[in-house]
């Protein structure tokens, strides 16, 4: 994903489309991911992550080079649809697996898994920025990254948990067995509310992924090699935040991470949008990434822990609606550029972050408090 994001400006120029048309094409990336998640969630519950994750990862790596080979808007549309499908299947299956690992581990670790995703973004941003500065062809770089990803995905298969053999923390099992049917229905409604929050947060992440580099080029006139570091700054801050988030969750709870993180993100994107100098814009993207870093992991974790037997399906629900945000975000920002400047369009993200901070109370439930308490006891 990092390799794709950094090469968006070059691919946009090669295909010869405007920002608005690109925004519409990016809808297909989210649409493909939505369909992939729809299939991969229940399939992971049935077959297990050991089967679904490596296959999805290999296909995702193989499809990465397709956008770089596109010659016109139609071929780019098909490439984004296929790449989105493979990425969506991988996203849901690996997060469902992470929920089971977190249960067995006995303490918050979801943000740590998401941190390694951000590490990939940082590495890709740095490598791609260097390659762009040297005049390398985007297709060659994306092919190399995709091949490496496919090999790693297949090599990891034996280390993943097989279907039907998930070892769970006994505290979680007791909690779920004691949950009456009425409360389970309430948890199902809460999963959908978590999904709405994921939609808003992932819309903000998608905007950073797809428009951060273009923002520096268009608004501040930065060269492509410098503009690539906007996403790199965002991804680096996401990595640092996710490496710290699990410890913060263990001490203060997931609600505090979601509320204060979303509020910090609102401040960051406002600074990035309004900043007149490169250093203020980079600071804004850093704060935006730091604030958002712990939000999605908490939403995914809460959904997965709502029902151990349907972790894949519940994560799929939250991720699918979240990817509606990924789907809508780039298009909405692109369409808004018809009316206002790109940096002004980013103020929509400020509003969404503020609403997410206000809705963080959904994580303050009896189930979440019991989960945190069990994790605390297991550490003792």
Image (cartoon, grey):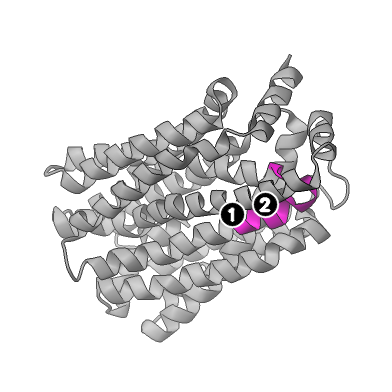
Examine the rendered structure and indicate whether residue 263 appears above or below residue 186. above
User: Splitting the image into 4 quarters, where does residue 375 fall?
Assistant: top right
Residue 309 is one of the magenta-drawn residues: yes
Examine the rendered structure and indicate whether residue 304 appears above or below residue 112. below
Left-right relation of 41 to 33: right
Instruction: State the SS at label 2.
Output: helix
Q: Residue at x 24, y 50 (%)?
A: 226
Crowd band around label 2 with a 10 angstrom C-alpha radius: few (<14), some (14–19), many (20+): some
User: Splitting the image into 4 quarters, where does residue 139 fall?
Assistant: bottom left
Q: Is residue 92 visible?
A: yes
Crowd band around label 1 with a 10 angstrom C-alpha radius: few (<14), some (14–19), many (20+): some
Tell me residue 142's x, y (percent).
Answer: 47, 63
Which mark identifies residue 192?
1
- The residue sitting at the left extreme is 276
Q: Residue at x 23, y 58 (%)?
A: 345
What is the magenta segment's predominant secondary structure? Answer: helix
Task: Return the residue nearer the eye: 125 or 175.
Answer: 175
Examine the rendered structure and indicate whether residue 312 appears above or below residue 26. above
Tags 1 and 2 touching, CB below 8 Å:
yes
The residue tagged 2 is: 188
- The residue sitting at the right extreme is 165
- The residue sitting at the front extreme is 182
Q: Residue at x 53, y 46 (%)?
A: 117
Magenta-colored span: 305-318
Separation of marks 1 and 2 at Cα, in angstroms? 7 Å
Q: Residue at x 13, y 42 (%)?
A: 277
């Amino acid at each position: 994903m990092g390799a794709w994001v950094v090469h968006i400006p070059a691919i946009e120029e090669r295909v010869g489309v405007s920002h608005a048309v690109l925004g519409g094409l990016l809808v297909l990336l989210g649409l493909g991911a939505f369909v992939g998640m729809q299939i991969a969630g229940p399939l992971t519950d049935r077959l297990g992550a050991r089967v679904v994750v490596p296959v999805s990862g290999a296909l995702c790596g193989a499809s990465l080079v397709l956008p770089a080979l596109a010659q016109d808007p139609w071929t780019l549309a098909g490439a984004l649809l296929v790449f989105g499908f493979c990425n969506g299947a991988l996203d849901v299956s690996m997060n469902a697996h992470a929920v089971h690992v977190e249960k067995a581990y006995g303490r918050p670790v979801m943000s740590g898994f998401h941190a390694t995703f951000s590490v990939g973004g940082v590495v890709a941003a740095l490598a791609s920025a260097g390659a762009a500065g040297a005049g390398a062809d985007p297709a060659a770089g994306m092919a190399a990254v995709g091949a490496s990803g496919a090999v790693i995905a297949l090599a990891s298969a034996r280390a993943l948990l097989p279907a039907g053999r998930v070892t769970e923390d006994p505290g979680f099992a007791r909690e779920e067995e004691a949950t009456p049917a009425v409360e389970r229905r309430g948890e199902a409604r809460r999963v959908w509310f978590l999904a709405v929050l994921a939609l808003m947060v992932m819309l903000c992440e998608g905007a950073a992924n797809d428009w951060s580099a273009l923002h520096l080029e268009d608004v501040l006139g930065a060269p492509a090699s410098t503009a690539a570091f906007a996403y790199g700054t965002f991804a680096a801050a996401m990595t640092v935040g996710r490496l710290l988030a699990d410890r913060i969750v263990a001490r203060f709870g997931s609600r505090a991470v979601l509320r204060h993180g979303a509020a910090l993100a609102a401040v960051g994107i406002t600074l990035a949008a309004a900043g007149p100098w490169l250093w203020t814009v980079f600071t804004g993207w850093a704060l935006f990434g730091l604030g958002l870093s712990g939000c999605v992991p908490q939403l995914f974790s809460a959904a997965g822990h709502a029902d151990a037997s349907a972790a894949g399906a519940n994560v799929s629900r939250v991720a699918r609606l979240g990817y509606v945000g990924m789907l809508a975000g780039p298009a909405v920002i692109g369409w808004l550029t018809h009316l206002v400047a790109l940096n002004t369009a980013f103020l929509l993200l400020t509003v969404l972050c503020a609403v997410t901070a206000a809705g963080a109370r959904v994580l303050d439930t009896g189930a979440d408090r019991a989960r945190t308490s069990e994790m605390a006891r297991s550490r003792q």
